Image: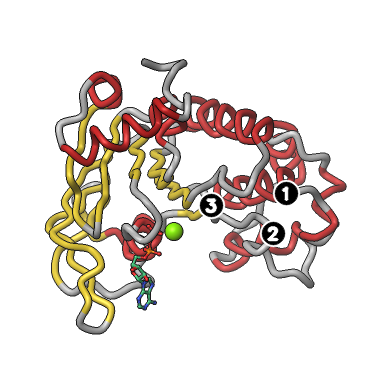
Amino acid sequence: MLRLSDVNVKFGKTPVLRDVSMTLPAGQTLAVVGESGAGKSTLIATILGLTKLDKGLITWANVPIKACRPSLVMQEPRAAFNPVLSLRRSILEPLSAKREVISETRLGQLCDRLELPLEMLDRKPREVSIGQAQRAGILRALIAGSPLILFDEPLSALDAVTQKHTAQLIADLQTELGFAALIVTHDLGYAAAFSDDIAVLREGRIEELTPTPAFVQNPQSDYGQELRAAAFALGALEYVA
Ligand SMILES: Nc1ncnc2c1ncn2[C@@H]1O[C@H](COP(=O)(O)OP(=O)(O)O)[C@@H](O)[C@H]1O
Ligand SMILES: [Mg+2]
């Protein structure tokens, strides 16, 4: 289980995360929703250990998060890769860093699963579509073998059809492989359809953390109600409510 206890982060004197506490059980999906500037990317950077805690504790399975080595799937699929290297080099980098190898057979199986022809890995990021680059990003995260994968707006750079397909693919891979997913998104429709729990982040504070079906029926916080009403107005919740 991922556990954040009373996490505070400041940039200079400005608090960006304030008393953030949340849990994500192994294998489950927690969606963190909030508008731009709420602190979602900072939350991810903090869990990855890239941003210093001002106060608080982050653990996985009751030991400091560092030992868990969470993986990250980034928002801008092409920018997530070194532009001059083949996708293969970038994807295998987390393994080489640990002096581990993966067999071509296993790599081929994972590529099949992600609908990426193995030969495509010899291309550079700009030589594949955005959707393929995002699936390559997911492949890189999977290969590291972490029990926790963090997704920073994983669909926002994709077109509507590719969004749907990628959302379902992430969910299916979770069922098959068992990793926990923390997904930050401004898209409540996506969160509602694919998470176990929804946390609402506003100005660096958690306004509520609610099981998803209960949130879709009736959010606990005023701001949660506002987000839900806005998503309904856009038609984003009509399939789950
Ligand atoms: N490196 C930084 N230095 C100073 N302020 C930052 C830095 N990164 C983000 N911020 C500020 O922190 C707040 C939260 O940003 P961010 O975590 O990127 O939000 P989100 O991902 O929800 O859009 C914003 O007000 C942003 O301007
Ligand atoms: Mg962000």
Q: Residue furthest bottom?
A: 12
| 130 in relation to 99, above or below | above
Q: Is residue 155 visible?
A: yes
Tell me: 25 left or right of 127.
left
Dot 2 and dot 1 residues touching (CB under 8 Å): yes
Question: Of label 2 and label 1, which has the lower sequence position?
Answer: 2
Secondary structure, mark 3, is strand
| 75 in relation to 23, above or below | below
Disc 1 from disc 3: Cα separation: 13 Å
Residue labelled with disc 2: 78
Compare residues 139 and 153 and report the one nearer the observer: 153
Residue 106: give x, y in percent of width and height.
69, 40
Tell me: 139 left or right of 233.
right
Residue 115: give x, y in percent of width and height.
75, 34
Q: Which mark is residue 222?
A: none
What amino acid does circle 1 point to? Answer: Ile
Q: Tell me the quarter of the picture where residue 228 sits.
A: top left
Compare residues 218 and 8 and report the one nearer the observer: 218
Q: Which mark is residue 73?
A: 3
Q: Is mark 3 within 8 Å of ligand 2?
A: no
Question: Of label 3 and label 2, which has the lower sequence position?
Answer: 3
Q: Tell me the mark number nearer the camera, choosing from 1 and 3.
A: 1
Residue drawn at x 68%, y 30% is 161
